[in-house]
Amino acid sequence: MTEVIRVAVAGPFTDALDYRLPVTGPAPVIGARVRVPLGRRNIVGMVTSRPEASDLADDRLRAVTEVLDSAPLLDPATIELIEWAARYYHHPVGEAYLTALPARLRRGQSATPSVETGWRITESGEAAQIDSRSRRAPRQAMLLEALQQSKTLTAVQLAGFSGDARAALKRLVEQGLAETVTAPDYGLLQGLSNEPGAVLNAEQQSSAAAIQPGAGHQAILVDGVTGSGKTEVYLDAIERTLALGRQTLVVVPEIGLTPQLVSRFQQRLAGRIAILHSGLADGERLNAWLAARAGEADVVIGTRSAVFAPLKHPGLIVIDEEHDPSLKQQEGFRYSARDLAVLRGYRLDIPVVLGSATPSLESLANATTGRYQCYPLRQRAGDARPPSLQLLDMRGEPTRDGLSQPLLDRVRGHLDAGGQALLFLNRRGFAPTLICHECGWLAECDRCDARYTYHRGRRRLHCHHCDRERPIPHHCPSCGSVDLRALGLGTERIEAALTDAFPDTPPVRIDRDSTRRRGSFEQAMRQARDGETRLILGTQMLAKGHHLPAVTLVAIIDADQGLFGADFRAPERLAQQIVQVAGRAGRADRPGEVVIQTHHPEHPLLQQLLHGGYSAFARTALAEREAAGLPPARAMALIRAEATARDAPNAFLQAAMQQTPGDAAIERLGPYPAPMERRAGRHRAQLMLLADSRNSLQTFLSRWLPGLSRIPEARQVRWSVDVDPVEAL
């Protein structure tokens, strides 16, 4: 009988594919990579199982070309997590496996870390006399003395010696007084443990005491207002996890939050820290991944895909800013790192801590039903007091490029008092629209149902949806007029207005345009934290997780843009954004003030935030979702289709509707055009499915989706399924 292995490969394959074992050499083990033929190519795949037999005839089975790993790269628990996620999100299993691997491993490169060269003292070196060579070979004597004291020297330590220290060491090696050694270099950061832990207040103590590493699985929601010291609770739990010899995985939503968190962890913890995110070079990311797998990293801090990082000694998982939509992958394998982290913790029988100042409605619903334990932190750490919140009615108010005089007066008052002012506008560029004053022509993207954003600094029009750019026209393409005007507000425009209003206090702008250069974001945030700049302007990059102790005023320039969004989650996103950015004010011993400019001060959402805070908003929003039959009260999936032909997506979804199983438990809405119907030259439509339980929805999708590719209309479209979508657009 032909011996068979099952290999997960990239491609539109629901299941792994069967291959014959290689003709020579050892058989690959489950969890190892192999190179296999697929069509005319040889590609990298992951061995998932060894079935007793294949459904394919022997003459149709192709043989494994090369075995890349002699030992498993992935442990059984990680394999089970990946396969469960592929089934739940209805994504090809091979692509799910490749998502979990660093780029170098996906390309078939060696699963070995970088190598660090060092030097070690020998027995002869231990016995050698320093004085006898100090005059004729002073540099050798200095290095020999250092080796006798520390026993080893690394290349980093060697760089601290003057002169040609490497040549001197070479002489010591030739004399048998030292020897060259090599060791894996995982690129880990060593915790300094320089700072004692903060004295926890009563609320923090209660939250920290609830987290019990080593005592089994718990899902704990730390619902803490901004500045309440959630990170101190995490650190307390991580220290106790390290004491047990176990690893901690910390997942953050964005790369921008990583440096600040790493610095704080490094100052407090004694363990070794690995960093995992897409901003690293391929070699650095591989080293960190291998360190987590080998148990060399005590703490692994990473973004979304780090949820799949293999851990040799798992002990604790922390999800920071658990409400953030960036934790859900929006393209390809559409998994939720937050939800998978909770599942992973359950299967590994370890605690999972979810923290946020503005918890998602899904997490609050889980806390209400008892799936999560919830510990509120309502007291700011230290002597910090909650900022005062005020709505500034803009109706009839004269403005200077979006800045009202009362707001400018408040900014000036805080600057004069020695404070910092942070102004928030979640719209980059100079203006969202370029318009002809004569005929009303608008600069519209010819590939999207959207307008170009005017970037004055680069003299370009830029579509933020498809990334197309074009130069600024010299005259109106419609009527020939040269009177083209910027309409609306962007961070560039506010920066110019602030520069005019406060010439002696130049603002620093922090958005995707101003921080494109490597290290520029970290530099700008350091200037803001250290008080080098006193006027800060930015987008949502500033809204979460950053500690800016000198900020005494936060101004939200335009709160209205999120009040009337088409997505049913728009109010939740706006409330979270307002509360998060408002939380940057008054985090030290000086009182903070938050001013929100709006043309709708009577809007219920703003009134709830003003008088009851985020918790009051969340209670109302949960009740509204329950009444409307929307998540988290019900389970949801979206089927999206897109094509260059206008009618093709709708035709495919209509045909797909005809194939749906007769299940009364599933509510079908659509098909209907996507809110932005045309994007990047492709027309889009979608179909919404709702069910009272996830099991009902999963059963329905498992029966229905496999047949959709066989629909004739499927050849004209690209289609995808999004389970538990965080955006209904």
Image: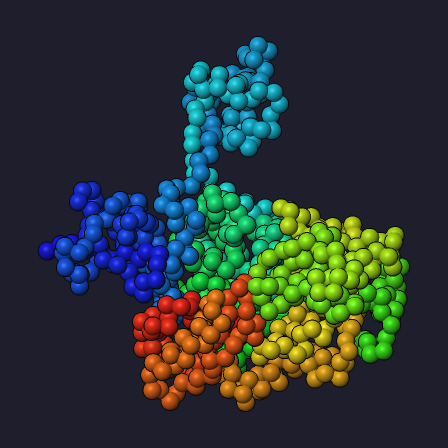
Q: Residue 660 vs residue 187: left or right?
A: left
Viewer-side residue, 405 vs 357: 405
Q: Is residue 487 above or below residue 529?
A: below
The reply to whether residue 328 is visible in this rendering is no
Residue drawn at x 45%, y 45% is 287
Say whether residue 386 is left or right of residue 311.
right
Q: Quadrant of the C terminus?
A: bottom right
- Residue in the picture at 70% in, 84% down: 604
Residue 122: x and y in percent read: 43, 23
- Whether residue 711 sits left or right of residue 608 in the image: it is left
Asked if residue 485 can be seen in this view, the reply is yes
Give the answer, above or below, for where 423 lies relative to 503.
below
On the image, the x and y values in percent for residue 196 come to: 63, 53
Residue nearest the observer in this picture, 615 or 222: 615
**Residue for point 43% across, 49% down:** 103
**Residue lying farthest to the left in this orientation:** 1
Query: Which residue is at the far front?
Result: 479
Residue 547, located in which quarter of the rendered image?
bottom right
Of residues 498 and 88, the one nearer the viewer is: 498
Which quarter shows the N terminus?
Answer: bottom left
Residue at 45% over, 22% down: 178
| Whole-percent x, y for residue 154 in the image | 51, 31
